[in-house]
Image: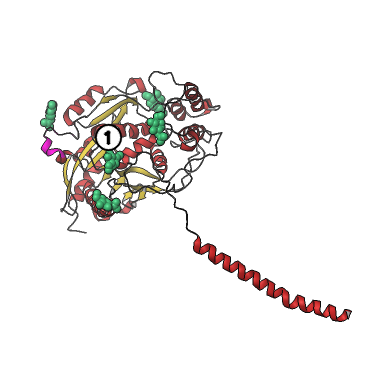
Amino acid sequence: MGRCCRCNGRLLCMCLLPCMMTGHLLVYILVSIFVTISYAPPKITVHYVAPGVSVNSSAMASHPLGPFWNLRLEDSALWNRLQHAWDRQHNPILRGNTTGKMSKTKERRLSQIEEGCLSDCMSHKCSVPRMDDLNSLPEQIRAFIKSMHCREYPLLINQPGMCRSNNSNLRSMDSPMLLMAIKSQVGNFENRQAIRETWGRSGVVKGESKIKSGLVRTVFLLGRQDSSTGPHPDLKNLLELENQKYGDILQWDFRDSFFNLTLKDLLFWNWLEQHCPTALFVFKGDDDVLVRTDVLVDYLHKQLEEHNLWRAYTNETDINLFVGDVINNAMPNRDPSTKYYIPESFYKGVYPPYAGGGGVVYSVSLALRLKKVSERVRLFPIDDVYLGMCLHRLGLSPAHHPGFLTFDLPHTERGNPCAYGPVLLVHRRTPKEMLTLWKQLQNVPGQC
Ligand SMILES: *[C@@H]1O[C@H](CO)[C@@H](O)[C@H](O)[C@H]1NC(C)=O
Ligand SMILES: *[C@@H]1O[C@H](CO)[C@@H](O)[C@H](O)[C@H]1NC(C)=O
Ligand SMILES: *[C@@H]1O[C@H](CO)[C@@H](O)[C@H](O)[C@H]1NC(C)=O
Ligand SMILES: *[C@@H]1O[C@H](CO)[C@@H](O)[C@H](O)[C@H]1NC(C)=O
Ligand SMILES: *[C@@H]1O[C@H](CO)[C@@H](O)[C@H](O)[C@H]1NC(C)=O
């Protein structure tokens, strides 16, 4: 009897258990199928609007491409610390509606967090940011830190009529297709003159293919270089004469130095918004480069055509163009003997993708958005990197174009005009070289 029971139990186990398991599996499958059929994905309607983008734009990203608020604080680096405070202050989740009125105590707390001040810079009421090893740093970065809260300087020489017409019928004719904004220094008269005589000549420029043309205007961006900013000879009268003759100088009241170059971008954007918002594209570059303006005009026409095609589908009116020689994953230079030296106590981390060396081309509509977002990005001493930081905050990256030659052609090719076929820009040319090369490039087509 007992033996038989044991035998039945084993039978039960061997037969019933698999049956039960199969049954469970079936139920599981049925439930899964039912759930899958009845499930509808939730509709995500939250849109992230980058500051400065027009509200009606249909090209809004549905969500940020990456983490856009860095909540981890790099406590030991000054720039990161100051930027972190601004990020918190402008974070819509932490701060809610910032367009509304703030209470007095809230405001005071903010200015304490900030350790600097936004505007009001000429009145010298701002405190210089605290930094422990400030006195052990090179003079250049020290001077930068002491004035990095200042970003508004008055214009000394303006060109309010550059893009304006007295004849309203011709308004569209007066709006430049391409505005050349060239960073120069008071003493570099020879460079400016060579640019005026070659690639920066104001007027209608025919494209290389001779089919299309565009109106080009040139302005030079200058700071101050006189006895008040260092041992400089006073060239004020000469500059005035030059401006009377050519009317293409913009000068602001700040010391023209390498670490102040970012100011030229910011102040130029202010000027652009006020005096030339109807231009289409900007070339921004140095006064020791050579730009093939005719090739650039053709390139920009192609961009416009592509944009118009795109626009037919999306109704998107803003052109988002930013091209140059793009550098990815660059680390700050930590060699104190170089001009680009950024100490670790000032900035930590990798640089965002940026367009370096010589010059970049961007659309005016993007420049206006960059201006807006720059109000939320702390000044950085290297201008190219700063532009990369601002682009990054708009969720954009600079586009690489192989025609921007930061590092020039190989030595043996430099004298050969045929080697310049696809080149848009070459870096480091003296005024004399500019004139020679420009002349050679005018007679290229037949030979190559
Ligand atoms: C958005 O479109 C509406 C009507 O379509 C218009 O009244 C408004 O001015 C537009 N806003 C912007 C910022 O373009
Ligand atoms: C923000 O606050 C201002 C003033 O209190 C108000 O006019 C505005 O509608 C608010 N905006 C939002 C998105 O709540
Ligand atoms: C436009 O008008 C102003 C005065 O209203 C004058 O000074 C200027 O020369 C004029 N410009 C041109 C291009 O006619
Ligand atoms: C930038 O310009 C301001 C105003 O002239 C000056 O105080 C500051 O020292 C300059 N910064 C550098 C790094 O030269
Ligand atoms: C673009 O605008 C036109 C008219 O303004 C409208 O009919 C069309 O639906 C819009 N297209 C898109 C993709 O928004």
| Chain part drawn in magenta | 164-171
**Depicted 247 relative to depicted 303: above or below:** above
User: Which residue is drawn at the image coordinates 32% and 22% (left, top)?
Assistant: 226
Q: Secondary structure at mark 1?
A: helix
**Depicted 132 relative to depicted 386: above or below:** above
Residue 180 in the image: state x and y as whole percent. Answer: 25, 39
Residue 438 in the image: state x and y as whole percent. Answer: 21, 46
**Depicted 371 relative to depicted 446: above or below:** above
Assign the N terminus to one quadrant of the image.
Answer: bottom right
Q: Nearer the viewer, residue 23 or 209?
A: 23
Residue 400 in the image: state x and y as whole percent. Answer: 36, 51
Q: Amino acid at mark 1?
A: Leu
Q: Can the viewer see residue 108 in this picture?
A: yes
Residue that numbered label 1 is attached to: 272
The quadrant of the rendered image in which ligand 4 is seen is top left
Magenta residue check for 180: no
Magenta residue check for 169: yes
User: Which residue is drawn at the image coordinates 72% and 73% (left, top)?
Assistant: 17
Q: Can the viewer see residue 230 in this picture?
A: no
